[in-house]
Amino acid sequence: GVLKTRTLGAIIEDIETGVSISTEDLPATDDEPGILKLDAIADNQLWLDRNKRIPPGLMQDAQASLRKGTLLVSRSNTVDLVGACVYVPEDYPNRFLPDLIWQVSLKDEARVHPEWLQLYLSSPAGRREICRRACGTSGSMKKLSMNVFREIPYPLLSEGVQRSTVKLLRTWDVSIKKLRKQLSALRQRKAGLMQQLLTGRGRVPEFRRS
């Protein structure tokens, strides 16, 4: 049968907004305060190193730091990236929201695992719902309003199904990361081999003289 749905507005506790701070384009260390760049949420991952250091004199302008169990959502970006969403696995008191990223917290009684919701919103089905609602006059940049974001539907699934789904997909993520490392190592080996063969410092085994 058709799955029942509910809108995000029914389960959202709060949507925090960040600020725009004019800083030098230098990344902060782990111990320094930094404001996230827009590409800090990309490829379904949170890239904490993609930030700009906040000088001490501007710290009073920083508002919301990253909190465990929330979702970060890009409210304005290209058509392909507007509504990009990542899960925050722990508190990061030295990383702050920029003006183009929201921090979304869910109600405790919502019975929706935030990590599952992140996976759904990043899936083809979730992306379709987001892109249908994103608007803007520019052909390259689209925006989401809070009201429109709250109208996005999601399927009602049991907490057990949500947990199992998260566990399964995260297992796949681990496997994919391992394969990427192996592929990277093979590419490096190939590059080294090419350097040897194409400069004449190495020989293909079939053409070595006995």
Image: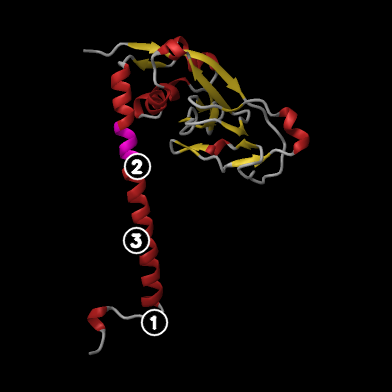
Mark in front: 3 vs 1: 3
Alpha carbons under labels 3 and 1: distance apart: 20 Å
- Tell me which numbered mark, 3 or 2, is placed earlier along the sequence: 2
Please check the rendered image and state whether residue 172 is part of the magenta-colored stretch, yes or no.
Answer: yes
Q: Which mark is residue 201?
A: 1
Q: Disc 3, disc 1: CB below 8 Å?
A: no
Mark 3 secondary-structure assignment:
helix
Q: Quadrant of the C terminus?
A: bottom left
The stretch in magenta equals: 168-174
Question: How far from the left and from the top, in percent, is residue 94?
Answer: 62, 35
Is 49 above or below relative to 94? below
User: What's the mark number on residue 186?
Assistant: 3
SS state under label 1: loop
For disc 2, the marked residue is: 174
Q: Is residue 195 magenta?
A: no
Q: Amino acid at mark 3?
A: Leu
Residues under labels 1 and 2: Cα distance? 38 Å
Badge 2 density bin: few <14, some 14–19, many ≥20, Cα 10 Å: few
Which marked residue is nearer to the observer: mark 3 or mark 2?
A: 2
Circle 3 packing at 10 Å, graded few (<14), some (14-19), many (20+), is few
**Residue located at (60% from left, 42% from top):** 30
Residue 136 in sight in this render: no
* Main secondary structure found in the magenta portion: helix
Tag 2: residue type? Val
**Extreme-right residue of the structure:** 57
Q: Earlier in the sequence, mark 3 or mark 1?
A: 3
